[in-house]
Amino acid sequence: MQLGSIEAGGTKFVCAIGNEDYQTKDKVRIPTTTPEETLSKTIAYFKQFPELKAIAISSFGPIELRRNSPKYGYITNTPKPGWANTDFVGRLKQELDVPMYWTSDVNGSAYGEYVMSTLFNENINSLVYFTIGTGVGAGAIINGHFVGSLGHPEMGHVRLKRHPDDLDFAGICPFHGDCLEGLVSGPTFDARLGKPGKDVPLTDHVWDIMAYYVAQAALQVTLMMRPDKIVFGGGVVSEAFLKKVRHEFSELLNDYVNVGKLTDYIVMPSVKDNGSATLGDFALALNEYNK
Amino acid sequence: MQLGSIEAGGTKFVCAIGNEDYQTKDKVRIPTTTPEETLSKTIAYFKQFPELKAIAISSFGPIELRRNSPKYGYITNTPKPGWANTDFVGRLKQELDVPMYWTSDVNGSAYGEYVMSTLFNENINSLVYFTIGTGVGAGAIINGHFVGSLGHPEMGHVRLKRHPDDLDFAGICPFHGDCLEGLVSGPTFDARLGKPGKDVPLTDHVWDIMAYYVAQAALQVTLMMRPDKIVFGGGVVSEAFLKKVRHEFSELLNDYVNVGKLTDYIVMPSVKDNGSATLGDFALALNEYNK
């Protein structure tokens, strides 16, 4: 069976064809330019596969995913030039006659990690996936379904208790200053230290400060949702960083609730090379086809 | 039809009989003394109703609600003297041969408010209920189901950005100091001002500080779950206080996501006289009977 995945990012689209075992059979990268050019190339790619049964799209946002909204399938008020108010699904539907599933980029990744966990027979029915890169976002699955009634989560913008050694940093979120994204996204390295994160060794105290904030995000999710697992992906995250996060999390939680073994609870993505969303999309496309 | 509700609180149990329209037909209050005495009186109460079809119990906690746990149905490590490790459901099952549904006190209240919303034809499928009283807790429903895979939420213990006029207050939570409960529960009035909350007029700046923290809890829930509605109950909460909370929430959210009209989104319980849990229990007992 041929299933389609569109991982629509702000710099590139990753379009792929997979099968019902979630194996990628073909893949292409399309630079994100204008909506018309990018979506036309995307359509042309999938037109090569006449046996295609369904497509799942996990897109940068914000997006409208309430099916009863007239703007369902749109990228809505994104700051990305040219892309605000783009009828993504509508444009695809004009030329591709297959069922389509539409969700956020982080929801796609969350679903990929969820599917991987079930494939490995972990007893999982809830999972949260954070990405920490240029921005911070998260997708959540509870009882096998995505969380979000009024829209998709925007967990990057929660407020946090400030680290005592970081009180002078105002944060860089244009909307909220020192929300999670304003305190730990990739560009905060430049804002705090005048150099990119890749040039800041893990021995630098700023990594402890970041770990303190990321651990609070994990704590909020833990106390609010009690998920089975929290996955952290994105360019800022490494196993060495997560070790610090687990340490801070443990201090903050103070054994208040049991989350099991921390190295099984706060983890890196199990799908390598940022492939969680593509795998998730194949699974979501299969669900959509089977409906 | 006769349905039973047990609202098991730390100072009293409210046991009630209702019908399938969620109307209370009989009600009794039993002081919470020892487990044996309190549960015996509870059993004796329900034995008066031989037509009883099912009981739902919403209990103080922490409780074990994972059905695959050997401690399912227990109150677990509560600090309440004598009640740690109490087999609540097991004791009832010894003498009452009806289906029983077991959940946390705040889940019961959340379900009551959820049912009320659906009765009023609000298009609701997710709701969070906070209680702010002696402690702070919350129950959450997403897609019609309770949230919590590893256990029930413990939202009272999230960390928050501190209010600039409140930095000297260490908070009173014995586990976490300045978590939400440590900053806004009823006893914080005594800790901050040396007098109980009922003696502190709403013009006192402490109410603005409390509203700032409670608004952050609402913000966390909003950005993490995107529920349809957030209900605040408990002794600390009044409509005048929620007006302050809405103001702070609006400042913090900065229009980042749309939650609709704030007076419909952040609300007092629609069931009066703390009756949300009893109504929720009747609905949960009916679900259990219909299974």
Image (tube, coloured by chain):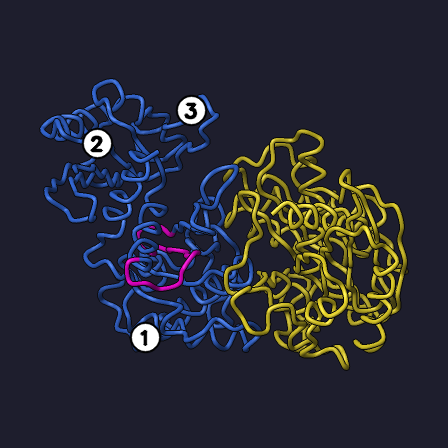
Chain colours: A yellow, B blue
- Residue B211 lies, in percent from the top left, at 40, 69
B19 left or right of A155 in image: left
The chain to which mark 1 is attached is B
Which residue is at the far top?
B94
Q: Is residue A176 above or below residue A210?
A: below
Any magenta on residue B124? yes
Left or right of B161 in this view: B172: left
Residue lying farthest to the bottom in this orientation: A82
Which mark, by number, is residue B71?
3
**Residue neighbourhood size for the residue with mark 3, other residues' Cα within 10 Å, grouped as few (<14), some (14–19), many (≥20):** some
Q: Residues within 10 Å of mark 2 (few under 14, many from 20)?
A: many
Residue contact between numbered discs 2 and 1, judged by CB atoms under 8 Å: no
Which residue is labeled 1 in the image?
Answer: B204
Q: Nearer the viewer, residue B128 or B144?
A: B144
Q: Which of marks 3 and 1 is nearer the N terminus?
A: 3
Q: Which of the 4 quarters of the picture holds residue B125?
A: bottom left
For discs 2 and 1, the disc positioned in front in the rendered view: 2
The amino acid sitting under disc 1 is Asp
Q: Mark 3 lies on which chain?
A: B
The lab-note entry on whether marks 3 and 1 share a chain reads yes
Give the amino acid type for the residue marked by disc 2 in the picture.
Answer: Lys
Amino acid at pointer 3: Lys
Residue under label 2: B53
Query: Are dots 3 and 2 in contact, CB under 8 Å?
Result: no
Badge 1 crowding class, 10 Å Cα cut-off, few under 14, some 14 to 19, many 20 or more, is few
